[in-house]
Image (cartoon, helix red, strand yellow):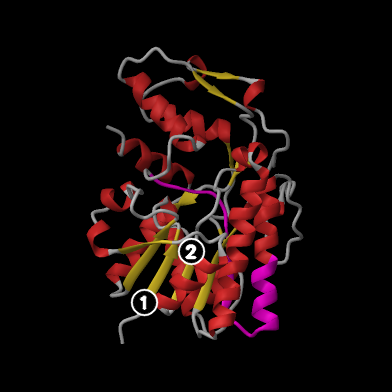
């Protein structure tokens, strides 16, 4: 029988790639936005799949809205990707961040419990929950130490999912995804900001790229691979949480250097540091241990930071 998938936040990077993947597997795909009629869904358009997805308006932070839409769709699988996605912005909009992430997750879980649906539920948890692991790769049992409102919200939502799984016997899982990039990332994300600036400078622009802390280290992967891991989690025999990462970490300085080198440029001539761009609190080191995902799901990252940079650079025009 044809399965029905329901993706909140379908207009974002992960939502678009996940929709594309599920369509290739024969799913009927529903996606939501707070105001579907006013949303452009540019990522779905770029992938050429907008006309294959059924889009609906739903506000996850509003329980009535959430209950009504889920009751109408009766999905086999829900992938909850919606919510405020910027760590930096969460310091400026902490209330909106907490509400959109934590209350949104709670409302979907409550709707599923109320409707008594056998729907499998995926929640987009985050590596930000771990905080600075000080050089140690984080695994599924690494303690959380969130250092931003975004991370606090994701940690709370993560524990809600675990609670509903155990208390109400729901098939509900957390995907603890480390940084994953693609050309669908908005330019406000640092990886896209870096690659875009390098490309423009290679074409004659005299701009200077201004960045915050170049010494932060991240585990960068390729987004289309990570959405496959989301799908695999809901196909597993039992509901479990998984870390999804490459297992390799590099500094932002290394990322910048390689991105500029793609265009034959010396990054040091075009990049400056600005203390104004430093966050009030920052993770110095972030690295994941994806061994469990490899062992149980058969998932392993194929593209690492250098591969991701090359793909991003090749996509510029």
Image quadrant assignment for residue 279: top right
Task: Of the two numbered discs 2 and 1 on the same chain, state the one appearing first in sequence.
Answer: 1
Q: Are marks 2 and 1 in contact (CB under 8 Å)?
A: no
Question: Where residue 59 sits in the image (x, y, percent)?
Answer: 50, 59
Residue 226 shows in the view: yes
Residue 286 shows in the view: no
Q: Quadrant of the N terminus?
A: bottom left
Residue that badge 1 annotates: 4
Image quadrant assignment for residue 106: bottom right
Q: Seen in the image, is 160 located left or right of residue 30?
A: right
Task: Count neighbours of disc 2 (C-alpha within 10 A) and say few if under 14, some if 14 to 19, many if 20 or more.
Answer: some
Q: Secondary structure at mark 1?
A: strand
Question: Where residue 3 sits in the image (x, y, percent)?
Answer: 35, 80
Q: Quadrant of the C terminus?
A: top left
Question: Where residue 310 sits in the image (x, y, percent)?
Answer: 37, 40
Q: Nearer the viewer, mark 2 or mark 1?
A: 1
Q: CA distance from mark 2 to mark 1?
A: 26 Å
Closest to the observer, 317 or 41: 41
Q: Seen in the image, is 56 located left or right of residue 233?
A: left
Task: Count neighbours of disc 1 (C-alpha within 10 A) and say few if under 14, some if 14 to 19, many if 20 or more.
Answer: some
Segment tinted magenta in the rendering: 159-182
Q: Name the residue at 75% across, 46% down.
A: 134
């Amino acid at each position: 029988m044809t399965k029905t998938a329901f993706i909140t936040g379908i207009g974002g990077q992960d939502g678009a790639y996940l929709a594309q993947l599920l369509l290739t597997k024969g799913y009927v795909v529903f996606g939501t936005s707070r105001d579907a009629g006013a949303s452009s869904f540019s990522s779905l358009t770029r992938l050429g799949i907008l006309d294959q997805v059924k889009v609906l308006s739903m506000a996850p932070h509003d329980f009535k809205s959430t209950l009504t839409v889920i009751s109408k769709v009766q999905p086999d699988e829900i992938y909850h990707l919606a919510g405020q996605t910027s760590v930096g912005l969460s310091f400026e909009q902490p209330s909106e961040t907490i509400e959109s992430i934590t209350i949104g997750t709670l409302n979907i879980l409550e709707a599923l419990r109320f409707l008594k649906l056998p729907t499998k539920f995926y929640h987009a948890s985050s590596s930000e929950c771990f905080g600075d692991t000080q050089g140690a790769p984080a695994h599924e049992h690494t303690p959380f130490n969130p250092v931003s409102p975004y991370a606090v919200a994701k940690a709370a939502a993560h524990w809600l999912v675990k609670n509903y799984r155990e208390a109400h016997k729901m098939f509900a899982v957390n995907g603890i995804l480390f940084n994953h990039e693609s050309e669908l990332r908005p330019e406000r994300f640092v990886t896209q900001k870096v690659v875009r600036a390098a490309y423009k400078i290679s074409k004659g622009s005299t701009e200077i790229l201004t960045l915050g802390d170049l010494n932060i280290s991240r585990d960068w992967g390729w987004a289309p691979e990570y959405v496959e891991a989301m799908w695999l989690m809901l196909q597993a025999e039992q509901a479990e949480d998984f870390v999804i990462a490459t297992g390799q970490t590099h500094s932002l300085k290394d990322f910048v250097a390689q991105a500029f080198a793609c265009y034959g440029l010396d990054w040091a001539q075009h990049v400056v540091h600005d203390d104004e761009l430093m966050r009030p609190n920052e993770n110095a080191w972030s690295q994941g241990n994806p061994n469990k995902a490899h062992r149980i799901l058969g998932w392993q990252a194929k593209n690492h930071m250098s591969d991701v940079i090359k793909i991003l650079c090749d996509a510029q025009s």
